[in-house]
Image: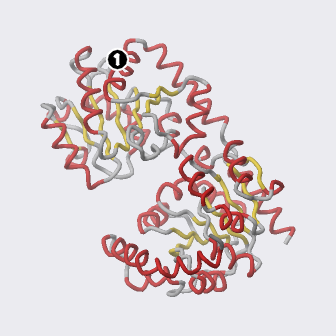
Amino acid sequence: MRRAGYAVLSRLLAPVMGAVLWRRAARNHVPAARRLEWLGRGAAPPSGAWWVHAASVGEVEAALPLIRGLRERFPRVSVLVTTTTPEGAARITAAGIDDVHHRFLPLDLPGAVRRFVVAARPRAGVIVETELWPHLFAACERAGVPLVLASGRLSDRAFRRYQRQQPLIGEVLGVPMRILAQDSTAAGRFRALGAPPGRVEIGGNLKFDRDPPAGAEGGAALRAALCSAEVPVWAAVSTREGEDEAVLAAHAALRRHHPDARLIWVPRHPQRFDTVARAAADAGLSVARRSLQADAPGRADREADVLLGDTLGEMGLYLAAADVAFVGGSLVPLGGQNLLEPAALGRPVLTGPDVSNFAAVARALDAVDARIEVADGDALGAALVGLFGDPERGRRMAVAGQDVVASGRGAVARVLGVLEETVAAG
C-alpha cells in the first residue's frame, strides 16, 4: 500500500478513531472545545515554537528531560507538546514546566494535519520514539518543517508490521528527517524499511536522562513503617491483567522461606486496584491500601502482608521501599514496562520474557547481569528466594544496573545538538 491507498483507508477509519478518542476524552473530562484539536481545529497553537510529539504517558515521560532541556537552552522560545491521549495531556500539565503549551495531535487526515502545521509553523518537530504518520510527515515536508525522530525504536512486532507495509513506510521515512535510533538494532531496522542510511544514527534513549522517579526520597521511611529492616520486601510494579496469579504464586514461594516477607503491589492501571486487592485477599493475604494511609502507615498496615500501591505519582516511593523489583507487563505478551526506574534506584530487576518495549534497555542490563528473566510465577518465586538468600548477588545487580543508567545518559544533549544543526542548515 502506498500513500494514495493509505489516504482512502484513513478517511474510512477516521470516524471510528474519532469516536474512540471522543469517548476517551469524555471519560477524562476533556472539554468539548479541546476535542476539536483532533480535527486540526480549536484554539490555535503557538506559532514558531519547538514542537515535541509524545503519543501518551510513556512517551511523555521520555520527552520530559528533552522539554526541560529546550526551555533551558532556548528560554525565549515556547515549546508546543502534542499528545494523542488525554492521559498524556494530563501528564504534561502535571509537569508544570513554564511556557510549555499542549495540543492534541490531529488525526492523520490531510486537511486536519495541514491546518495544524500551517497554524503552528514550528521551528522543528521532534517525534518521540516511533510515530510514523504519512499525511503529517508530508504536510511538514511541504511546509518546510524539519523533523527529528528521537529515541527511535522498533519492537519486533512493529518491525514485522512495517515490513508488510514497506512501500508506504519507505515513503514516510524518505521525507527530510534525522532519525536518532536508540541503538544499532533499531538503526538497522529503520534503514531496512527504507530510511536513507545517511540520515540514521544512534542517538540513545531519552529515558536514561530522566530524573529519579518521584517520591524515592520517602522510601526508607515507608519501609521502616511497614516492617523491620531484616524482613524481605519486594515490589511487583506495573502489573497487568493475566499476571496476578504469578505474583501471588511467587509471594507464596517466598513466604515459605521467609514467612514475614512483604509485597508492595502496584498495578499498571487504576481500574485494576480493587481487582488486585480482592485477589490478594482471596489468597489469604492481608492487604493495606496506600490511598487509605494518612501521613504514614498505621499498625494495621505494618501487620499487612501486602501494601497495595493504589496511588498515582509514587512509583519512586514504592520502588525505594523494596529490596527487589519485578516489572510487569512482561509475563503476558504486552512488551513490558519501564526497566530503568528500578535500575536507577539500585534495585535488582526481574521481568518476564516479553520486554520488547524496552529491548535495548534489557540488552544493556543483561550485558552486566543486572536483570533476571523468569518464565512464570514459579520461576519468579525461585528467583526471589535466590536473591534474598544471596544478598551479595543482589548488591552486584544493583550497582551494575545503576552503572547502565549512568552510562546511557546523553540522549537529550544529542537531540538538542541535532536541532541546532537542523535549524542552522535550514
Rendered image quadrant of residue 170? bottom right
State left or right for residue 396 relative to residue 309: right
Residue 51 makes an appearance in the image: yes
State left or right for residue 215 relative to residue 295: right
Q: Residue at x 38, y 84 (%)?
A: 32
> Which quadrant does the C terminus fall into?
bottom right
Residue neighbourhood size for the residue with mark 1, other residues' Cα within 10 Å, grouped as few (<14), some (14–19), many (≥20): many
Residue 79 makes an appearance in the image: no
Which residue occupies the foreground of this view, 159 or 326?
Answer: 159
Looking at the image, what colour scheme do you see?
secondary structure
> Which quadrant does the N terminus fall into?
bottom right
Q: Position of residue 367 (x, y in %)?
A: 62, 26
Q: Position of residue 70 (x, y in %)?
A: 67, 62
State left or right for residue 258 relative to residue 32: left
> What count of labels does the image hold?
1
Q: Residue at x 43, y 39 (%)?
A: 216
Which residue occupies the foreground of this view, 76 or 36?
Answer: 36
Q: Position of residue 269 (x, y in %)?
A: 33, 52
Which residue occupies the foreground of this view, 401 or 96?
Answer: 401
From this view, report whether residue 37 is shown above or below residue 248: below
Amino acid type assigned to the residue bearing label 1 in the image: Val
From this view, report whether residue 40 is shown above or below residue 173: below
Rendered image quadrant of residue 255? top left
Q: Residue at x 29, y 33 (%)?
A: 247
Q: Position of residue 420 (x, y in %)?
A: 80, 63
Return the residue at label 1: 385
Q: Secondary structure at mark 1?
A: helix
Which residue occupies the foreground of this view, 245 or 44?
Answer: 245
